[in-house]
C-alpha cells in the first residue's frame, strides 16, 4: 500500500501543467479527530466516540487557474483516530485508536476577499498503520480490525494569507468510507455488531510556508 501511495503522489505531481509557475509550500498543524458511528448495536449496548488530538505535515503546490481560482494538489502525513467507548449496564475500558495515513487532497481554492479563500475538494488517504491502546497497556497493531486500506472523503475550509509567504489553513474533513470493514472484535468491543460503521471526522488547523 505504501508503494501504491508513493506512485500515486508521483503521478499527481508529474501531471501538473508545465506552463504553470511552480511553487512549493510546506505545511503542518494539529487536528481534532473523532468518528461518526452509524448503525449502532441494540439499545442494550452503546458505542461512543470521543475526540483525540493528532497532527499533520506535508507539502503542496498552488496552481493559479484564474485571478480568483487556484488548484492545490497536496501530499501530507496525517494522524486520525478516536477514543472508543462501549457501555453495557456499566462502561467497559476505553481504547484509543490511532489511524495513520498518507493523504492526498486535491483542493479548489477560491478567493472571496483579498487574502481570504474558500477551499473545497476531495481527498484520498492510504493507511500506513493502525494502533490501539487500552489503559496503561502498550499499544498494539489493530490493522485486522480497522482493515480498510483506503479512506476517502471531502474537505471544506478557509485559507488566509497573513504574510507574503505564510498562510493559515482551517479545514474540516468528512470521511465517506468506514475505517473498518467489520466491527471491532477485541474484548473492549465485544458488544459491537457487524453492521456498525465508523467514518473519520477531523478538524484541522495549520500553518503553511512558501519555499519558492
Image (cartoon, rainbow, N blue to C red):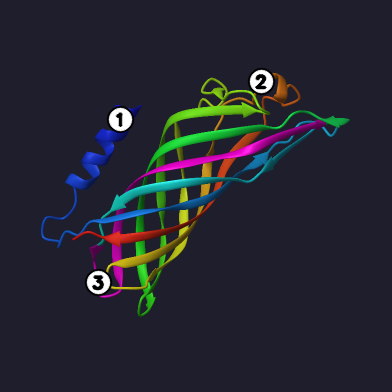
Q: CA distance from mark 2 to mark 1?
A: 29 Å
Estimate how packed mark 1 is, as few (under 14), some (14 to 19) or many (20 or more) residues with alpha carbons within 10 Å: few
**Residue appearing at x 43%, y 58% in the figure:** 206
Is 40 left, or right, of 182 in this rendering? right
Residue 72 on the magenta span: yes
Secondary structure category for the residue under label 2: loop
Q: Give the foreground label among 3 and 1.
A: 1
Secondary structure category for the residue under label 3: loop
Residues under numbered marks 2 and 1 in contact, where contact means CB atoms less than 8 Å apart: no
Circle 3 is placed at which residue position? 66
Nearest to N terminus: mark 2 or mark 1: 1
Residue 106 on the magenta span: no
The image quadrant where one finds the N terminus is top left
Secondary structure category for the residue under label 1: helix
**Residue appearing at x 58%, y 41% in the figure:** 199
**Range covered by the magenta-colored residues:** 63-87
**Residue appearing at x 76%, y 25% in the figure:** 191
The one nearer the camera, 26 or 23, is 26
Marking on residue 4: 1
Is 119 left, or right, of 6 in this rendering? right
Does residue 3 show up?
yes
Marking on residue 185: 2
Estimate how packed mark 2 is, as few (under 14), some (14 to 19) or many (20 or more) residues with alpha carbons within 10 Å: some
Q: CA distance from mark 3 to mark 1?
A: 32 Å
Percent coordinates x, y for residue 69 in the rendering: 30, 69
Percent coordinates x, y for residue 185 in the rendering: 66, 20
Q: CA distance from mark 3 to mark 2?
A: 51 Å
Magenta part, dominant SS = strand
The image quadrant where one finds the C terminus is bottom left
Estimate how packed mark 3 is, as few (under 14), some (14 to 19) or many (20 or more) residues with alpha carbons within 10 Å: few
Q: Give the residue at the far right of this rendering.
A: 89
Nearest to N terminus: mark 3 or mark 2: 3
Amino acid at each position: 500500500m505504501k508503494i501504491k501511495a508513493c506512485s500515486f503522489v508521483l503521478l499527481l505531481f508529474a501531471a501538473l501543467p508545465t506552463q504553470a509557475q511552480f511553487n512549493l509550500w510546506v505545511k503542518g498543524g494539529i487536528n481534532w479527530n473523532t468518528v461518526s458511528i452509524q448503525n449502532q448495536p441494540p439499545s442494550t449496548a452503546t458505542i461512543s466516540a470521543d475526540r483525540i488530538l493528532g497532527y499533520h505535515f506535508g507539502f503542496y503546490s498552488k496552481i493559479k487557474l484564474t485571478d480568483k481560482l487556484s488548484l492545490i494538489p497536496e501530499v501530507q502525513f496525517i494522524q486520525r483516530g478516536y477514543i472508543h467507548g462501549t457501555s453495557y449496564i456499566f462502561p467497559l475500558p476505553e481504547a484509543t485508536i490511532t489511524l495513520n495515513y498518507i493523504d492526498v487532497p486535491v483542493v479548489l481554492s477560491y478567493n472571496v476577499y483579498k487574502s481570504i479563500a474558500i477551499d473545497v475538494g476531495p481527498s484520498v488517504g492510504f493507511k500506513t498503520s493502525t494502533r490501539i491502546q487500552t489503559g496503561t497497556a502498550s499499544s498494539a497493531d489493530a490493522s485486522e480490525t480497522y482493515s480498510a486500506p483506503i479512506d476517502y472523503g471531502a474537505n471544506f475550509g478557509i485559507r488566509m494569507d497573513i504574510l507574503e509567504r505564510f498562510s493559515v489553513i482551517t479545514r474540516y474533513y468528512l470521511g465517506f468510507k468506514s475505517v473498518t470493514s467489520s466491527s471491532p472484535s477485541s474484548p473492549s468491543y465485544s458488544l459491537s455488531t457487524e453492521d456498525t460503521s465508523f467514518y473519520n471526522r477531523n478538524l484541522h488547523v495549520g500553518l503553511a510556508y512558501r519555499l519558492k
